[in-house]
Image: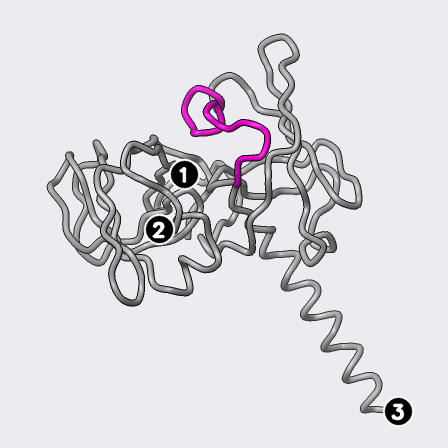
Amino acid sequence: MFTGIVEETGEVLAVEDEAGGRRLRIATTFDGLSAGQSVSVSGACLTVEELADGEWFSVFLASETVAKTYLGDVEAGDAVNLERAMPADGRFDGHFVQGHVDGTADVVAVEQEGDDWFYTFSLPENQRQYIVPKGSITVDGISLTVADLADDQFTVAIIPETYRLTTLSEKSVGDPVHLEVDVIAKYVESLVDREAVDHVVGE
């Protein structure tokens, strides 16, 4: 489980494509990582395979991850958002983020207003029912609040600190991002569907 509060960005140091997926080596300043630990890489929960503590770690992208994310297209020199899994006694500042990418979207518009930035993203049709104004959404691993919502796009406001600390500052119109909708919305949908089925069966 993650919070969507990005700790740092890491540079992709090396990419190795192989049968069944690809392997990334990512620079980091994280101390105390261990093999088997989960790390959110631009919103995708991945498992640490090898590491040099405080320098880099490597992760393997299975074919399913390559198919559902844009990590199959990143190359050496690209930056990714990094967050370690939340400890049981850790401070909870964002929202519940699983690191399960629901889909990809594209940057539609970027506008600066004063010190803040407004990013508009396309909205896949199959994700629309999970998103509400002022609700939570994860974009490239970043916990954000929906500021404006339309049928086919949504907008979020980015404060200077988030702009500085994440890869959003490097995103331009047309660039891809990962989306993870609020898991609570998924649970609500599941419960409503289940109750509807039980009601029909009970008639």
Please identify, in this view, whether the residue under mark 3 or under mark 1 is nearer the observer.
Answer: 3
The amino acid sitting under disc 3 is: Glu
Q: Describe residue 178's horizontal placement relative to residue 117 as left or right.
A: left
Which quadrant is the C terminus positioned in? bottom right
Q: Which residue is mark 2?
A: 88
Q: Residue furthest top?
A: 114
Q: Residues within 10 Å of mark 3 (few under 14, many from 20)?
A: few
Instruction: Compare residues 94 and 22 and report the one nearer the observer.
Output: 22
Which segment is the magenta one? 163-176
Give how far apart the Cα atoms at labels 2 and 1 are: 9 Å
Q: Which residue is mark 1?
A: 91
- Tag 2's secondary structure? loop
Residue at 67% across / 51% down in the picture?
124
- Tag 1's secondary structure? loop
The amino acid sitting under disc 2 is: Ala
Q: Residue furthest right?
A: 203
The amino acid sitting under disc 1 is: Arg
Image coords of residue 174 (percent x, y): 58, 34
Please identify, in this view, whether the residue under mark 3 or under mark 2 is nearer the observer.
Answer: 3
Residue at 41% across / 59% down in the picture?
65
Image coords of residue 163 (percent x, y): 49, 22
Q: Describe residue 116's horizontal placement relative to residue 86 as left or right.
A: right
Earlier along the polypeptide chain: callout 3 or callout 1? 1
Image coords of residue 191 (percent x, y): 70, 70
Q: Which residue is mark 3?
A: 203
Q: Residues within 10 Å of mark 1 (few under 14, many from 20)?
A: few
Give how far apart the Cα atoms at labels 3 and 1 are: 47 Å
Residue at 30% across / 53% down in the picture?
38
Does residue 79 sit above or below 124 in this rendering?
A: above
